[in-house]
Image (spheres, rainbow, N blue to C red):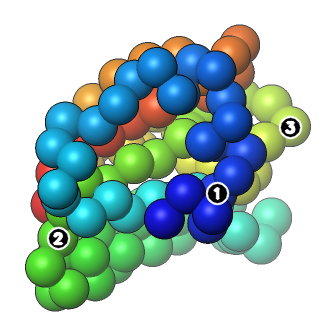
Amino acid sequence: MKQELPRIENNPYYRNLGTENDRMPLWRITCFVVHHRYRRCGVARTALKTALAAIRSRGGGLVEAYPVRRWGAYSKYRGTVSMFEREGFKVIASLGQSNVLMRRIV
């Protein structure tokens, strides 16, 4: 639903991309909040795998993520490109200097 994430919907880079299949449900994975003591221990990757399993159990669809390219201010919350690549996501486009749009069908 467009109202769920208006900031991405208003991003000029994003608006021009479209989706692979407009009839397919769209799921968005936006953030991971992991306590600083447990970062880089696989917690976010486990959460990602669990989210994908939950999406699959609800019929699946197109899954989007917006991870960071470079380690910085938002890296604590968005995940990294490599984490999503390990779970089958592909980079679709750049969303500014730091973020990319990644997609996968589940």
If the image is split into quadrants, where does the C terminus sit? bottom left
Closer to us: 14 or 105: 14
SS for dot 1: loop
Q: Which residue is mark 2?
A: 60
Closer to us: 27 or 47: 27
Badges 1 and 3: C-beta atoms under 8 Å apart? no
Q: Which residue is mark 1?
A: 5
Q: Which residue is mark 3?
A: 73
SS for dot 2: loop
In the rendered structure, which disc, 1 or 3, sits on the residue that comes first in sequence? 1
> Which kind of residue does numbered mark 2 sit on?
Gly
In the visual, does 103 lie left or right of 70? left
- At x 77%, y 72%, the residue is 35
- At x 80%, y 31%, the residue is 72
Q: Image quadrant of residue 5?
A: bottom right
In the rendered structure, which disc, 2 or 1, sits on the residue that comes first in sequence? 1
Q: Please, is residue 91 above or below residue 19 in the view? A: above
In the visual, does 12 lie left or right of 65? right
Q: Image quadrant of residue 39?
A: bottom right
Q: Mark 1 against mark 3, which lies toward the viewer? A: 1
Q: Image quadrant of residue 70?
A: top right
**C-alpha separation, residue under disc 1 versus residue under disc 3:** 20 Å
**C-alpha separation, residue under disc 3 versus residue under disc 2:** 31 Å
Which label is found at residue 100?
none
Q: Please, is residue 96 above or below residue 5 in the view? A: above
SS for dot 3: loop
**C-alpha separation, residue under disc 2 versus residue under disc 1:** 19 Å
> Which kind of residue does numbered mark 1 sit on?
Leu
Q: In this view of the protein, can residue 50 be seen by the observer?
A: yes
